[in-house]
Amino acid sequence: MGKPMAVLAVAVLMASLCSPARSDGSDHRYKEGDPVPLYANKVGPFHNPSETYRYFDLPFCIPAHLKEKKEALGEVLNGDRLVSAPYKLDFMKDKESEVICKKKLLKEEVAQFRSAVIKDYYFQMYYDDLPIWGFIGKVDKEGKDPSEYKYFLYKHIHFDIFYNKDRVIEINVRTDPNALVDLTEDKQTQVEFMYTVKWKETNTPFDKRMDKYSQSSSLPHHLEIHWFSIINSCVTVLLLTGFLATILMRVLKNDFVKYAHDEESVEDAEETGWKYIHGDVFRYPRFQSLFAAALGSGTQLFTLTVFIFILALVGVFYPYNRGALFTALVVIYALTSGIAGYTSTSFYCQLEGTNWVRNLLLTGCLFCGPLFLTFCFLNTVAIVYTATAALPFGTIVVIVLIWTLVTSPLLVLGGIAGKNSKAEFQAPCRTTKYPREIPPLPWYRGTIPQMAMAGFLPFSAIYIELYYIFASVWGHRIYTIYSILFIVFIILLIVTAFITVALTYFQLAAEDHEWWWRSFLCGGSTGLFIYAYCLYYYYARSDMSGFMQTSFFFGYMACICYGFFLMLGMVGFRAALLFVRHIYRSIKCE
């Protein structure tokens, strides 16, 4: 893709992400008595954020003219399904105990509401693009035995709305604890749904109205924990990398002196250590096509992550800019597929591979394939549950079109450019015709123990921050401190690169020349540690339950951790390759 096209695409993306979801094209300015758009979004169990349903899946009062709001791609992917709400909150018009409707709840509807109250259902709405939440009922646990519990539905909602001149600044929702409907028994019940509206003036400017939603994550004690975790990570990283650097530099210096001395003293002196295998160290790895594809996919995901961080630091992902992150992920992933094609094919051709078309197909499927299969399974689960996480057919068609018309052509163009780049693999040493036999090594020098050692250190540098990320993605917290997250990401890359280089040196010193795949696996092993943390978070830190939530959590986290595996594996291998080239350039190899 040409540079002007790339710049134009990024500019269009920025414009589409920065514009907030408009309420009926309104500029958020109203006169007294003007209708202000209020949309009911979804209901669902409070502890299962993925398991959400349409608001009117519960038998609430349906307005006479029910209309659905048109939504952007990211909003649909986020599970938002906005419809006009039954409440009328006109600008600066107070209302006192206004009746929406009188309704006779049938036995089945009472049972439906009771089931929702037992599962701690909450509702979410948007008023002039401001999010509001509330619980739909409560459980009275005065009786010791669960059979004596009483279940109540709230029938009266209070809206407190703050305005500044002609703009809505803030809205709070309260439920009247005295206006209750008893749902304990399966019997028909007469309900009168009501609401009260109170308007109050405030001095808060319009551009600060979203600040309150991001304050929770930047409270002083939260910030202290974040900074403490970063300082802790930095100190750990500096100490360990300092120790490793000192050891490596000393050992390498001794090696260089020893090898130089050997060359001067006896020409045919027996070589030992990493110099001994100079004829094998640049022998191309097995499964070259898969290796190049993994490298290409990892490079693409790395680029995607960097772009997402740039948008986050610029301030695009402000709280409740609905679906902006999902839109960005889909669009940037599509636009960066050329990078995957170029990196993969050029490296494959450097490794003297011949079937570059098959390599390109493998690159295209390596990350998208598992993601597509996971999505198909989880979307089927969501359809069975009739949850809002189930994507409509139109959205699936849009994603397929993006993949067909943008991702695939850019991948192919990148592949052709990579094939024609004619770059050569710069090996400082000639490779011998037959590989040397690798000497028997102790168990702890095997691939699995080395991966465990390589993954633990980078994971320990990020695990405190992981809790906050999980609590925002799989909970109701809001994550806004992207600057801290970016620092953590940089630390993760440095530690991954360093630990992979150190382990590669020890592997070569033990005369094991099969370092290519090992360096990739060691770099990516942090992804496996993050998935292990998912198990701990699910069972020890969250209250998630049910088949749908469990499958969504472990399914999509598997895809994310696999993405981390490819990205960090690429970082580990690139660092190891630079190091290996450097040390073999520094000695004379025949």
Image: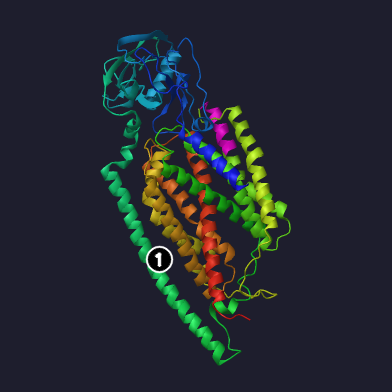
User: Which residue shows up at 40% across the image and 66% down it?
Assistant: 241
User: Which residue shows up at 40% across the image and 39% down it?
Assistant: 472
How far from the left and from the top, in percent, is residue 72?
52, 29
SS type, badge 1: helix
How far from the left and from the top, in percent, is residue 400?
63, 35
Q: Quadrant of the C terminus?
A: bottom right
Visible residue check, residue 24: yes
The residue most toward the right is 354
Q: Main secondary structure of the magenta part?
A: helix
The magenta region covers: 375-387
| Badge 1: residue crowd in 10 Å (few <14, some 14–19, many ≥20) | some
How far from the left and from the top, in percent, is residue 227?
31, 51
Return the residue nearer the eye: 398 or 10: 10
Q: Is residue 436 left or right of residue 245?
A: right
Q: Which residue is mark 1?
A: 241
User: Which residue shows up at 41% across the image and 24% down it?
Assistant: 126
Tell me how many marks there are: 1
Visible residue check, residue 538: no
User: Which residue shows up at 52% across the image and 41% down it?
Assistant: 555
* Colour basis: rainbow
Give residue 586's quadrant in the image: bottom right
